[in-house]
Image (spheres, grey):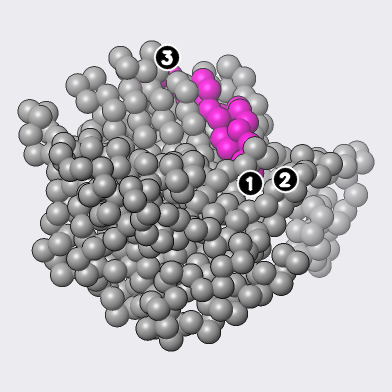
Amino acid sequence: MFGRRGSTTSFGDVPRPAAPAAPAPHGDDAVLAPEPAAPKPDKPAAAAPAPRPAPPPPPPAPPRAARERGENYYDTKSQVFSALIDTIDLSQLANLDPDSAREEIRDIVNDIIAIKNLAMSISEQEDLLEDICNDVLGYGPLEPLLARDDIADIMVNGAQKVYIEVNGKVEQTPVRFRDNQQLLNICQRIVSQVGRRVDESSPICDARLPDGSRVNVIAPPLSIDGASLTIRKFKKDKLTLDQLVKFGAISPEGAEVLKIIGRVRCNTIISGGTGSGKTTLLNCLTNYIDRDERVITCEDSAELQLQQPHVVRLETRPPNLEGEGEVTMRDLVKNCLRMRPERIIVGEVRGPEVFDLLQAMNTGHDGSMGTIHSNSPRECLNRMESMIAMGGFSLPQKTVREIIVGSVDVIIQAARLRDGSRRITHITEVVGMEGDVIITQDLVLYDMQGEDAQGRILGKHVSTGVGRPSFWDRARYYNEEQRLANSLEAMEKAAN
């Protein structure tokens, strides 16, 4: 399949140097091996005693991503990698499926190690094989981190420093890149998959991985110590509201209220700070959209993973090298209105597009949703006013507030607490106006009650005693009023 450049001979057709002998089976493998009829002197049976007592089995190796490596390892890796690039035909490699390509690379690397007579332990050789396969076919040193489902964020600060967030806490890893150029190459590989680019002329880029994970890259000269790469990872198994209940993010009764809000097509804004779980909560709420509704999503980088069959996903586009061809979020939201949507979902509202989203909510597209960065429901309303002003709309303040009141039904506030846990802290409905002031009322609040010996925050979700929310008539229209009343009553009883 692969030969040296210019050769059509496969590595499989020429005799390879002898590879290191595989270790004799022991433990469970020895039990499963067939017992020979008569042990031979030169080939003892698996159960035959060894000349010296066998050492105790070594402790299990740590994950490859967490293993410290010295300079010698990286020097050896550079030698083998250079020899591999000189040997293989990349055009033929591109024609293979990933598994076949990975096996072929492993075979060739084993040959190179044998030819160069490199002194390596079996574990170092396995690490080297895995790392080089990841460099050629994947995202290099990031692959082990991307494979872990317990990591929420990966933060790369230049080639030598990689941090991760696990269970709400940030920690440094021993993962490192060969140099800043390798890091930049991997950044370019990631963003090129979604038609973006990152280089000196365009050093800032937002992109996504195939699983929807959010990627941000800022490259030199803006990033002084090498490219900075940030990945907001999404779990392979998408979270549901029932799972959020198990994690304590919301009570079972509060989850029922959220399910009803999604089901009865309340116009909903999810508010929260960075990393508070807004996108996750938005994904959870969309599970309760009827499957016969036409849903259109607008995002800067497509992250939402809706399960409904009738979904149209739209994504903004940055300008090209000449500064032309940009498609903004506002352009997408405007175009949505011509696509016969029943619900419009904006992944993140951060500018004048909020005005177009409010107009859509107020003109027959009930059940539309979006997320906004803010720290409380009241601040969320103020930010919507500010973003409308950013668009250059010269409307009186009272008119802007009347548009907001006529459009938004519910604000759900998410927060990441100081112990790293994420909680839904408010379910608040927008009631109306008194004079020039928007009136809101809280349905559900998170009451913090202290912390335990491990520093975890203790608290519970409580009802504020509102037995008949403003969207009661909407719930009745969808035959959900009894379920809503039962949920609020059960939450009030649980609080007492």
Question: What stretch of residues is rendered in magenta?
Answer: 160-182
Q: Residue at x 33, y 67 (%)?
A: 367
Of mark 1 and mark 2, the one earlier in the sequence is: 1
Q: For this rendering, which residue is in front, 162 or 100?
A: 162
Residue visible at 71% across and 72% down in the picture = 493
Q: Quadrant of the C terminus?
A: bottom right
Residue closest to the eye, 353 or 226 = 353
Secondary structure found at label 1: loop
- Indicate the amino acid at tag 2: Ile
- 378 lies above or below 481: above
- Residue 317 seen anywhere in this rendered image of the structure: no
Q: Is residue 163 magenta?
A: yes
Q: Earlier in the sequence, mark 3 or mark 1?
A: 3
- Mark 2 and 3 residues: CB-CB less than 8 Å, in contact? no
Report crowding for label 1: few under 14, some 14 to 19, many 20 or more residues within 10 A (C-alpha): some
Nearer-the-camera pick, 398 or 154: 398
Find disc 3 in the rendering and name its residue: 225
The amino acid marked with disc number 1 is Ser
Three-letter code for the amino acid on which mark 3 is drawn: Asp
Q: Which mark is residue 457?
A: 2
Q: Secondary structure at mark 2?
A: strand
Q: At 35% across and 40% down in the image, what residue appears?
A: 383
Badge count: 3
Marker disc for residue 221 = none
Q: Residue at x 14, y 66 (%)?
A: 339
Residue topped by disc 1: 421
**Neighbourhood count class around disc 3 (C-alpha, 10 Å): few under 14, some 14–19, many 20 upward:** some
